[in-house]
Image: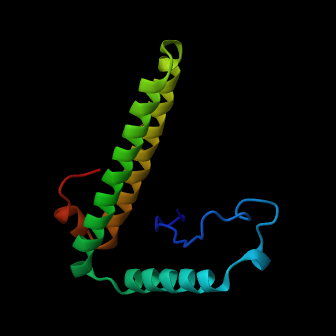
Amino acid sequence: MGLVGVPGVTFTNWPDPYIHSSDDDLWQMDATQLKRNAVAVAAVAYYLATAGDADLPVLATEMYGRALERMSRDATTAMQMIASAPAGERAEKYARGANSCEKRSTVSGARWRRSTRLGAGTARRHAPCRA
């Protein structure tokens, strides 16, 4: 996630033996994948640069829905981690899970607040509820 709160784009051939290794450099990159990334990033940049108030409800709804999906996934992971832990480790797993969920909520809320500034409050008026 960039500093302006726009999700990153990547198309990866998985498994990639070079990713996050000491051999991960431009020479190992697939030129076709790089072109796909460039087109996707350019399309997002164009959409955001030309979006007006009328586009904000769609953008805000997408952001909000994806945030709910991520928070749900984190909560499910946390609950599974707690449930599968031995009794003596459950307090530690609970703390880790709660911390993960809290961080996701904080990040999602910050993204939402940034989105409401894009259209002078248009997104705020169209949100099903606030993150």
* Residue 17 visible in rendering: yes
Q: Position of residue 44 (x, y in %)?
A: 43, 80
Out of 13 and 6, give the one closest to the viewer. 13
Identified at 46% across, 25% down, the residue is: 84
* Left or right, 88 with reference to 31: left
Quadrant in the picture for residue 12: bottom right
* Left or right, 35 with reference to 128: right
80 to 44, vertically: above or below: above
Out of 90 and 86, give the one closest to the viewer. 86
Q: Position of residue 3 (x, y in %)?
A: 54, 64
- In this rendering, the count of numbered labels is 0
* Residue 121 visible in rendering: no
* Left or right, 24 with reference to 7: right
75 to 114, vertically: above or below: above
Out of 120 and 65, give the one closest to the viewer. 65
25 to 49, vertically: above or below: above
Q: Residue furthest right?
A: 22
Identified at 52% across, 68% down, the residue is: 8
Identified at 43% across, 38% down, the residue is: 77
Quadrant in the picture for residue 74: top left
Identified at 33% across, 63% down, the residue is: 63
Q: Position of residue 121 (x, y in %)?
A: 24, 67
* Left or right, 107 with reference to 29: left
How is the rendered protein coloured?
A: rainbow
Q: Residue furthest front?
A: 15
Q: Residue furthest top?
A: 88
Q: Position of residue 81 (x, y in %)?
A: 46, 30
Out of 100 and 20, give the one closest to the viewer. 20
